[in-house]
Image: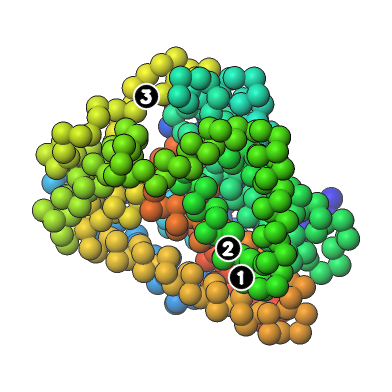
Amino acid sequence: MGRVRRHAPVLPVVAVVLLLCVPPGADDARVGPADAASAALVLWCAVRLLRTRARPLTRSAAVVLAAPAVAFAVATVASTDPAASLPGLVRHLQVFVLVPAAVALLLRDRADARLVAAAVLAAAVVQGGVGVHQYATGTGASYQGQDLRAVGTFGPLDVMGMSTVVAHGLLVALALGLAPPDRAPRWLRPAALGCAAALTVPLALSFSRGAWLATAVAGVVVLLLAGRRLALRTLAVVACAAVVLVGGLGVGSQRVGDRLASITRVTAAPDQSVTDRYALWAAAAGMWRAEPLTGVGVKHFPAHRDAHASLALSSGSDTAGAGRAFSREPLLSPHSMYLLVLSEQGLLGITALAGSWAALVVLGVRRHRLERRRPGGRARDDVGLVAVGLLCWQLFDFAYADIGGPSTVLAGVVLGLAAWWALHPHDPRAERTAAP
């Protein structure tokens, strides 16, 4: 009971993460239980700040977290139809401002951050288990004419959902294995590294090329931050485990290999998904050239898509399987967060948002280096590795994906964790008493 009271302020954050394991409900539901919990999280944070009269964000933290909100508001006002942009404004504020700020304010110390990281790992294990079962029983989403694609509880409308959660859990397990907390049991390191290796299986069976690339990049970042020698040893272990699990046991090895090879086939016989992606990227660039400062308006990409897209763009994306009948979903975004913001919010929006994220990366790495120089800093290195690793994953993945679907709320939690780590006072004694 004492531990529950100890972590009471951060339990709503844990609830948001764990509710990602709950199916969104109706087939056409775009708002899942985790989204509803994120609204309760923001309200909980506001009430707690009013009751405790806690110190608000520091000036630097307020600038980093609030700058995107100003850009979102300007783009909405400058839109040709501000009323149609309001839902997009609310969604952007939720994911990139309100939820991150609430998470950063509710986290107090490393123990709270570790609890959130543990929730991410637990959600990854659950989603990964469901995904492997879907592949083994042929009940996943449709892929190359067969219901084999692992999508977890998210369904075929959010094929990136499971891979996102599993990749986050993999990075958490990797960080815990590389730098277990002080006084952690001896079994934690091998168990964490083994869990990271096991999560490569559902990640591979998701057939999500963007998630694979983002995980590889973020994993290398985590390894380099943990130390070069440790990085080399860990890479060898993970490579051997991947060979055994995917290659040796034949877990989707042929399809995974074909999917990997398709990454390089962007000009010579690309598949339709690659063709559509490049057509959408070109359309987004065309919108930006037409309205370079403030873009065409939040949520206005679909309305301007056909005027800027080439004839190579298909009418939609086929979805089926995982308990859902065949349907054709329209392509309503460029599948790149950076290009989506650039096209809809122009230079103002992309500068504010990317500038905020770049500040979190720089300040997060800087704090990691400062902490490692402190006495016993290496024994508390896991939280920094988790925060920086997850942030790097999210920012790299945004080159191939954008917000949408129930799993989007996890991006807000990750940005909040990264903001807490990057903007929190460096004094360990202050961690338990001060907000960012």
Question: Which residue is tagged 3?
Answer: 318
Question: Which residue is tagged 1?
Answer: 224
Task: Say which of 108 and 229 sits in front.
Answer: 229
Task: Say which of 204 and 268 sits in front.
Answer: 268
Tell me if I can see residue 231 in this picture: yes
Point out the tag, 1 or 3, that comes first from the N-terminus.
1
Identify which residue is drawn at 33% across, 38% down.
Answer: 270
Task: Say which of 72 and 339 sits in front.
Answer: 339
Amino acid type of the residue that numbered disc 2 sits on in the rendered structure: Val
Q: Secondary structure at mark 2?
A: helix
Identify which residue is drawn at 59% across, 41% down.
Answer: 203
Instruction: Report the Cα–Cα distance between label 2 and label 3.
Output: 34 Å
Pointers 1 and 2 in contact (C-beta within 8 Å): yes
Mark 1, other Cα within 10 Å: few <14 / some 14–19 / many ≥20: some
Instruction: Report the Cα–Cα distance between label 1 and label 3.
Output: 40 Å
Point out the tag, 2 or 3, that comes first from the N-terminus.
2
Question: Which residue is tagged 2?
Answer: 220
Coordinates of residue 374 in the picture (x, y in percent): 71, 84
Instruction: Report the Cα–Cα distance between label 1 and label 2.
Output: 6 Å
Amino acid type of the residue that numbered disc 1 sits on in the rendered structure: Leu
Identify which residue is drawn at 87% across, 56% down.
Answer: 187
